[in-house]
Image (cartoon, rainbow, N blue to C red):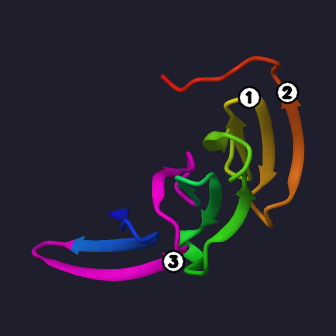
């Protein structure tokens, strides 16, 4: 079970029978608004209230890698681009859609939809 604390800490609870173990996986020091697993569960996107997106790979037990800092661009949401889990896509309220590599956070492409976007 993965969850985030309000301080921006990603925590993992390993639960087996009546026993559990707590592990702090990453500390990004920003409140996390959502966690999104890739379709194959190898990567986890951490999305903050301020519009920063991080990638975390549970099997590698490393630090969360910053993919996108959209704090000044009316950031709205991010998710994995399927099939596979090598890329993620983000969108701003103004309709700019961006594609990012999860390997190293490289910006790959963008398109502007020329329309305001809303999450429903």
SS class, disc 2? strand
Does the CB distance between marks 1 and 2 fall below 8 Å?
Answer: yes
* Residue at (52, 55) in percent of width and height: 41
Seen as rendered, the residue at the extreme front is 72
Seen as rendered, the residue at the extreme top is 115
Task: Say which mark, if any, is on residue 94.
Answer: 1
Q: Is residue 92 above or below residue 87?
A: above
Which image quarter is the N terminus in? Answer: bottom left
> In terms of image quadrants, where is residue 66?
bottom right
Give left or right: position of 7 versus 55: left
Residue picked out by circle 3? 26
Count neighbours of disc 2 (C-alpha within 10 A) and say few if under 14, some if 14 to 19, many if 20 or more: few
Give left or right: position of 120 versus 110: left
Residue 26 is inside the magenta segment = yes
- In space, the residues marked 3 and 1 are separated at their CA atoms by 31 Å
* Residue at (47, 78) in percent of width and height: 25
| Span of residues in magenta | 16-42
Give left or right: position of 99 versus 3: right
Q: Position of residue 89 (x, y in %)?
A: 72, 42
Residue 5 is inside the magenta segment = no
Q: Earlier in the sequence, mark 3 or mark 1?
A: 3
- In space, the residues marked 1 and 2 are separated at their CA atoms by 8 Å
Mark in front: 3 vs 1: 1
Residue picked out by circle 2? 112
């Amino acid at each position: 079970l993965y969850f985030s604390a309000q301080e921006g800490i990603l925590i993992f609870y390993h639960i087996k029978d009546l026993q559990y173990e707590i592990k702090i996986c990453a500390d990004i020091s920003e409140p996390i608004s959502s966690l999104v697993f890739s379709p194959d569960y190898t990567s986890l996107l951490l999305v903050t209230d301020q519009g920063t997106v991080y990638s975390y790979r549970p099997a590698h037990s490393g630090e969360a890698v910053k993919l996108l800092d959209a704090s000044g661009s009316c950031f709205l949401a991010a998710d994995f681009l399927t099939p596979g889990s090598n890329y993620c896509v983000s969108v701003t309220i103004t309709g700019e859609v961006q594609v990012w590599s999860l390997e190293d956070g490289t910006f790959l492409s963008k398109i502007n939809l020329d329309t305001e976007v809303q999450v429903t």
